[in-house]
Image: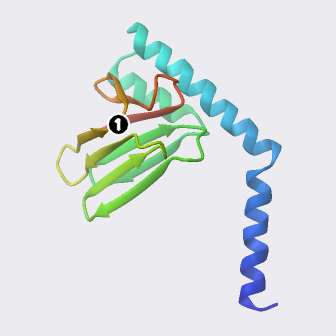
Amino acid sequence: MNWKEQLDKAIESVKQAADSEKAREIAAKAKSTASGLMDKVRSGAIGTATSFVEANRDPSSLQIHFLHAHLTILSPSEGIAITRPDAATLVISDGQENGLVINAAADPAFVVEQIGTVNQLSGNTFDLGAEDNVNVVVTRF
């Protein structure tokens, strides 16, 4: 089998895995966890440090560590994108023109800009998009 056939086979395997029942279960768990975390943050029952610890407990969360930025993303969305437009900047977007721009080189790192509809629910917890509790970003700088 040549490299093209191997690549095609690998891509097909990834597509099948993404459409699997397990992938749907993980997305449902991420949505449930994000919603629960947002409820706790809104009610004041959880502090900045605790929200980061709570978000990191979820096995479906995406964790990013880059320079001085430590992020946890709770999202079942297929549209979440994390890009690095330059050497020290991270951009997290939801595919619906909502996002965060983070200066990861600064010590401590910080959110430079909120793009579109972003609800900052606490000092370190952001909900991208409408208040749907779906694309939640928790920062620790």
Q: Residue at x 77, y 55 (%)?
A: 17
Left or right of residue 111: residue 62:
right
Image height of 58 relative to 12, above or below: above
Q: Residue at x 61, y 39 (%)?
A: 60
Q: Mark 1 packing: few (<14 Cα in 10 Å), some, or many (20+)?
A: some
Q: Is residue 141 visible?
A: no
Please tell me in which quadrant of the rendered image residue 129 appears.
top left
Left or right of residue 78: residue 105:
left
Residue indicated by mark 1:
116
Left or right of residue 94: residue 120:
left
Q: Quadrant of the C terminus?
A: top left
| Way the structure is coloured | rainbow
Where is residue 18? Give x, y as percent. Answer: 73, 52
Image height of 126 relative to 115, above or below: above
Image height of 7 relative to 57, above or below: below
Where is residue 122? Give x, y as percent. Answer: 32, 21
Please tell me in which quadrant of the rendered image residue 112 appears.
top left
Q: 117 or 17: which is nearer to us?
A: 117
Q: Is residue 136 visible?
A: yes
Q: Which amino acid does label 1 sit on?
A: Gly
Where is residue 52? Give x, y as percent. Answer: 41, 30
Q: Quadrant of the N terminus?
A: bottom right
Left or right of residue 106: residue 134:
right
Q: Which residue lies furthest to the bottom in this view?
A: 2
